[in-house]
Amino acid sequence: MATSSHILLQWLLFITLLHLHIRSKVHIPCPHGPRSHAQGILQPPTMVCCYSATLNSLANANHATTPTLIYAYSHAIHGFSAILSPTELQSLKKSKGVIAIHPDMPVQIHTTHTHEFMSLNSNWGLWPVSNYGEDVIIGVVDTGIWPESASFSDKGITQVPARWKGECVESTDFNSSMCNRKLIGARYYNKGFLSHYPIHIGVNSTRDTDGHGAHTSSTAAGSFVEGASFFGYAAGTASGMAPGARVAMYKAIWDGGIGYSSDVLAAIDQAIADGVDVISVIGLWTTPFPSRSNGNCIIHGHGKEHFFCRCFSGERRTCCCDCTKFSSMDANGASAIDRKFAGTVTLGNGATLIGMSLFPANALILDVPLIYSDSIKACDSTTDLSSAKDSIVFCDYIRPPLVQMSQVCNSGAAGAIIPAPTVGAYSSRGPSLISRAILKPDLVASGSRILAAYPPNVPAARLASGVALSSEFQLITGTSMACPHVAGVAALLKGAHPGALIYDAGARDYVNFLCSLNYTNNEMMMITRGSSYNCSNPSSDLNFPSFIAVFNPNNNTSATSKVVQQFQRTVTYVAKGPSTYTAKVVLMPGLSARVVPDTLVFQGKNEKLNFTLSMEGSLEGEGMVLYGSLIWVDEDVKHRVRSPIVVTNVL
């Protein structure tokens, strides 16, 4: 066990650098205080005192300003965020016990049918088994919420769970009475944002002035709303993935869709303290951070708290996360769904063109010219497109189409016709930036043209004439839209099978995995919150429900020789009564596999059994990727537990 003073100073800091006058260093030792017997750390009130004393020790009496404490964190991590000058930062780096310092990074934000697309219905499956996610609490870190939306009605919802410790914070345009049995909590965080942008925030509250937060939170847990549509498109009854779950909003993204990691971390920290079951964190780090930086520290650190984290990676390899009280971390992509919205352009000769469109169905528009010209067909120049004002322009497809649409809108053109690409470019395709031993993304969820709640004070559509149209529902595409789908399904699983996973991994498994990545002593202490970790058994073979075998083309074997790789897995049986599962392996030519044992006989609920998967194959040529799957099928052929297999020589 390390000394108390050493444990007390295991901090992670987010530093906002200000250009202040040079100051001399003054160091005052951090005082001892009462510790938690469970974790060996200071209790929150004493931690704040300790952090403040440490910052004061950096100040110089010859200067009017002093280092400023922004937040103290005690649940997601143990540390704080502060405003420091470069000199104070260097002094703090030299202080005994400081493990890691990271800059405060900017963060940007990146339905009626998707529940049916994901096979959620009232007759069978997760909805009735989990009672629609009843009493599961989803904490959403986003741009805020629109409490008046019908998606957050508490009609038919029971009393707030007694275990809930959160609150509904009153502020500008947001009364505590706006919370109910559905929306049970509302808080906001902007100290980090204001330290970078000392501006006046017009709506300084949890109210959503962007639309993103209302959309994502209703996607995760919105109540049933009949007659929902986006100007006639996607008409039907809208609902979130877990319509019986509760929502707690933690606003940390502000004007322009921008926030800072210090605020996001403060929101996560409070959400854990409030007692949420699922945390949906949606944000895009504008500056990529190292794989061992703040985001991963938070995620890995929750192996002790049994949190399950899902990250949806966008094209910039950054992520938004869903965390539930299980111990796992997944990265996810976004996919399309099985419907399209069509519009018809009728030409002067009577011919028609049908294509995807979200043009408001009831909007009035006069006959306008259709223009196709070599000089403007690229649709990438507002100046060139100005000649087509109040016309519909036919554009050649180039990447990215959003640039084309932006230029068309800014030029004053009435519309544009762009050939649709077959695959969206915004979703992650892997590989993992941390370890090639982990297959990423783990899964995909619906993220294209998702209908969900939207604030009426934010324009949902604009006509070419500049007319802004409002709607209580909006269709939006992005990894941010996929993220709450998984958050909602995680809430359903939490309600149906509390505390159980098929492939479970605990804190010890994650420590062994991190040890295999050659993390430094300081990094391991920062993540494990102490020096009691043991790296005597490092292993990159994490107990994940997926398999990736990387055959190194640069090893001593020939290109055609067989390579064998083994995986150890432990599965947990979550149903009642005995059952027998048999392994079935489906592989592409060139691969073979063996599962030992190939039959798992379970006697009762929560029993754990082990098996080994051995992959053998040869990959001829460079850049090869082969696919397959391992499927465990029960004796009644009612349950199929499928795990993807990837074999590659791409390093």
Image (cartoon, rainbow, N blue to C red):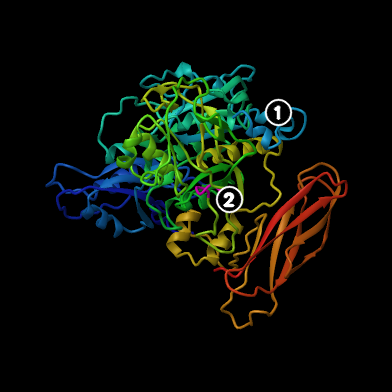
Choose top left, top right, bottom left or bottom right for residue 621.
Answer: bottom right
Can the viewer see residue 222 in this picture? yes
Name the dominant secondary structure of the magenta segment.
loop
**Callout 2 environment at 10 Å: few (<14), some (14 to 19), or many (20+)?**
some
* Front residue of this view, candidates 136 and 535: 136
Choose top left, top right, bottom left or bottom right for residue 393.
Answer: top left
Which residue is painted at 59% across and 60% down in the image?
A: 438
The image shows residue 586 at horizontal and vertical percentages of 76, 60
| Residue 330, label in figure | 2
Mark 1 residue element: helix
In the displayed structure, 222 sits above or below 509; it is above
In the displayed structure, 409 sits above or below 374; it is above
Choose top left, top right, bottom left or bottom right for residue 258.
Answer: top left
Task: Tell me the kind of residue under disc 2.
Answer: Asp
In this rendering, position of residue 167 left or right of residue 512: left
The image shows residue 338 at horizontal and vertical percentages of 65, 38
| Residue 74, label in figure | none
Task: Tell me the kind of residue under disc 1.
Answer: Asn
The magenta segment: 423-427
Q: Residue furthest right?
A: 636
The image shows residue 147 at horizontal and vertical percentages of 48, 21
**Callout 1 environment at 10 Å: few (<14), some (14 to 19), or many (20+)?**
some
Identify the residue under disc 1. Answer: 131
In the displayed structure, 366 sits above or below 96; it is above
Badge 2 vs badge 1, beta-carbon distance below 8 Å: no
Which residue is painted at 80% across and 45% down in the image?
A: 639
Mark 2 residue element: strand
Which residue is painted at 56% across and 40% down in the image?
A: 447
Q: CA distance from mark 2 to mark 1?
A: 25 Å
Q: Quadrant of the C terminus?
A: bottom right
Q: Earlier in the sequence, mark 2 or mark 1?
A: 1
